[in-house]
Amino acid sequence: MKPILMSPGIYHLGANITNGDLFEGLWPIPNGVSLNSYLVKGEKTALIDLMRDWDDATLTLEKELKALNLDFSDIDYLVLNHMEPDHTGWMRGLLDRNPNIQMILTKKAADIAREFFGVTENLTIVKTGDTLDLGDDKVLHFVEIPNVHWPETMVTFEPVSGTLFSCDAFGSYGSLEGSVFDDQISEEKHDFFEVESLRYYANIVSSFSTFVLRAIDKLKDLEIKVIAPSHGLLWRENPKEIIERYRRYAEYAQGPAEPEITVIWGSMYGNTKEVLNSVVQGIRSEKVKVHVHQVPNEENSYILGSAWKSTGIVLGMPTYEYKMFPPMAHTLDLFNRKHVFHKKAFRFGSWGWSGGAQKECDTLTETLKWDFLDPVEWQGAASDEVKALAMERGKELAREVKSLCKG
Ligand code: FEO
C-alpha cells in the first residue's frame, strides 16, 4: 500500500494480510484483513497503532514512511490504543530501530507491554482526558474504552480534522485494495464490507457488546468527522453509518436481532438431513429470510456471523453416543463464549438406539437464554408425520420471529 493523505498532516499507512493465515490463529480471512496505522505530523510526529511482523507488514510500513521521506527514527511517539499483538507485535523491533521513541498507552497496556514484550522503558501512561500536543495545531486526545476489545483499550481523537482513531472498534475483515474511504468504493464493495464487519464483530467483539454500547455513549459528544479504525474501511462520508451499525450489532445481544432465522444442521447418515428441507420450507412459507449452515463442513466464523444477526435459530442434529452430534456441541460452546444470547429456537434430530442429544442441548443452551419451542425428535428414519410436524415447527418459529421483530 501507499501512504494516503487523509487531512493536512494526517496519513493512513497500512498493510494487507493476504497470506492465508487465520486471524487470531482461529478465524479464516480468505479476503484478507488490513492492519491500519496512522501518521500524525505536527512539529513532532506520532504513529498511531503499530503492526506485528506479519506477511511483511512492517516492511510495507517502512516503505510507506520512506515515501514520505521518513524513517522509523523520525517518529517521536507511538500511540498504542490497544495491545493485542496484531497492533503491537513489532514494538520491540521498533524500539530497536528507534531507542528514543516514546510510547503512549494506558496503565493496563503498560502491564501488557511488560509481560508480552518485556518493554518497560520509554512508556508514558495516559488516561481519559489526557492530551498529547504535537505542535502545529495537532493535539491528540485520549479516551479509554475498556474491553473494546481488551481491558486496556483506548481511542485517540484529533479534533481539528475530527478524526477518531478507533483501533478495533468500528473495524472489519477484508483487505483495502487501493481505496480506503467509504466514499471511494462501489455498492458491491460496501455490501462486502457490511458482511465482513458483521463477521468481524461476531468473531472478535461480540462478547463485549455491553462495553461497545458504553463506548459509543462515551464518544457521543466528540465531533467525529472521520472514523479511522485499525482494520478495514475508513469512514469520512458517513461515519455515523459504522457507529450505528456497531450499536445495532451490540444490541443484538439483548434480542431481538434481524427478522431472520439461521438453521445449523449436521447429519450422520441422512436421517436428520431428511427433515431439513421441511423445516426450511416451513420458514420460507412465512416469508422469513433463512440462512442454512452445515456442521462440521462450514467454518464457525461464518455461522457466528449469521447467528449473531438472526432472531431465530434452528439446531438440527442427531444423537451421537448418548449426546449431541459433536460438531454442534463445539458450535454451541462458541455461542456461549461469544454471547449469542436471547434467541428464539427449536431443535430437530434423529436418534438410533438411544436419545440424549436433547438433554445435552438443554444443558449447553441454558446460559444462552434462548426461548425454545418443543423439539422434534424421532428414532431412525423420519416418517411423513415427523416431516409435517417439523414443517409446522419451522412456520411457528418464523411467525414468532416476525412478531418479536415487529414489536
Ligand atoms: Fe485488532 Fe483486538 O486487535
Image: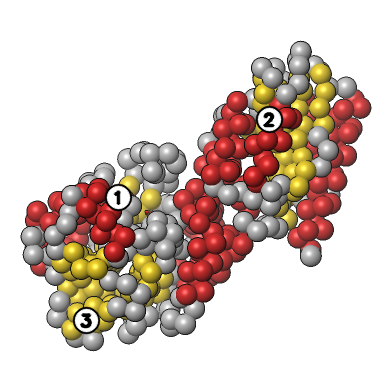
Residue drawn at x 90%, y 25% is 384
Give the percent coordinates (x, y) of residue 257.
Answer: 67, 57
Question: Is 272 located above or below residue 68 in the figure?
Answer: above
Quarter of the displayed picture in which ligand 1 can be seen: bottom left
Question: Is 328 located above or below residue 166 in the figure?
Answer: above
Mark 2 burial class by Cα count in 10 Å: few <14, some 14-19, many 20+: some
Residue 82 lies left or right of residue 207; in this view the side is left
Give the percent coordinates (x, y) of residue 48.
Answer: 26, 66
For disc 1, the marked residue is 85
Q: Quadrant of residue 323?
A: top right
Q: Amino acid at mark 2?
A: Glu
Residue 26 lies left or right of residue 277; in this view the side is left
Whether residue 267 is visible, yes or no, is no
**Mark with earlier residue (2, 1):** 1
Q: Amino acid at mark 3?
A: Asp
* Protein image colouring: secondary structure
For disc 3, the marked residue is 133
Mark 1 burial class by Cα count in 10 Å: few <14, some 14-19, many 20+: some
Give the percent coordinates (x, y) of residue 311.
Answer: 70, 52
Alpha carbon separation for disc pair 2 and 1: 37 Å
Q: Nearer the viewer, residue 208 or 10?
A: 208
**Is label 1 in contact with label 3 (beta carbons under 8 Å)?**
no
Q: Which mark is residue 265?
A: none
For disc 2, the marked residue is 360
The N terminus lies in quadrant:
bottom left
